[in-house]
Image: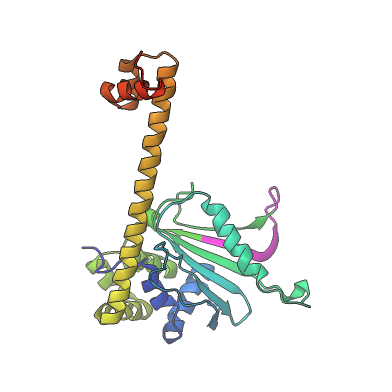
Amino acid sequence: MPATINRLNDFYVKYLLGSEKRKHLTIHFLNAVLYGDDAPQIADVFFLDKDLDPERADGKPAKLDILAKTDQGMLINVEVQVRRQAHLAERFLFYWAEMYGSQMKRGDGYNALKPSVSIILTEFDHLPEASWHNAYSICNDVSRRRLTDHFAMHFIELKKFTYSDVKALHRLGRWTAYFSNCGDRETEELAMSDPVMKEVVQAETAFTEDEIMRRKYSQREKAVRDYISAMDEARNEGLQEGIVQMAVKMLENGIDRHTVAAITGLSEQELAALKTAAAGGCDA
């Protein structure tokens, strides 16, 4: 049985990881992503982002943007991407560059810049690697020596994650299992395995029982569904237009209607109408 809510809903993730009240959960998550089961290196974070309205005026889903600054000055942006889009790598790089450059104020030297990290959770397969957690940095192509520790980009691809015995999961594995919308049994196992995950599950329960939060969550889910539906409809209309244009070209080049119909899926009646229209109303 799947989770009772979509845990990748950006309004919910904002509630869980972008709140001063639950800041310790954010710190635990960030340490898990960046340092695995090693000793935590982040002791505190300060939220810098703006509150996002669950439904923007233009109806498009606003990206999750949890921007935090650690006690050591590192900037970290957490994003959730639920739908594959064109030029995602360039988009993520642009957001990182925007975050990194925002540190410079008038009169500052380059020594004012601190490491900046993007953490991206995707609900689809994006990278060619088989592993579900991949980290990128700037390295020499031959020696693999890192140029700087100021750039890092972590991808967590939830579709590649396979839930196993919770006892075998490391710290990040437990977080990933949770965000992969695991079912009731797995969620209960996660809560029993780790006090932090128990608190995460309790936060989810409080969220679902809060009528105002639930309504905003539902509005956000509807906004995303409407956006996806509109994009799919526009894509289908564009595809159909392309098929029609291809059919006209084939007819103009003397290819018989039967062949064109077989290739394009258009009926011979539709092709006859296209040929008539192309001929200016006179079917040859």
Please say whether residue 145 is one of the residues in the magenta stretch: yes
Q: Residue furthest front?
A: 281
Q: Position of residue 238 (x, y in %)?
A: 40, 40
Rendered image quadrant of residue 12:
bottom left
Nearer-the-camera pick, 40 or 121: 121
**Magenta highlight range:** 140-154
Look at the image and tell me in which quarter the N terminus lies.
bottom left
Q: Position of residue 256 (x, y in %)?
A: 35, 13
Look at the image and tell me in which quarter the C terminus lies.
top left
Q: Number of callouts in the render?
A: 0
Q: Residue furthest left?
A: 1
- Residue 168 visible? The answer is no
Rendered image quadrant of residue 83:
bottom left
- Residue 177 visible? The answer is yes
Question: Which residue is depicted at the point 35% across and 42% down?
Answer: 236
Nearer-the-camera pick, 126 or 133: 126
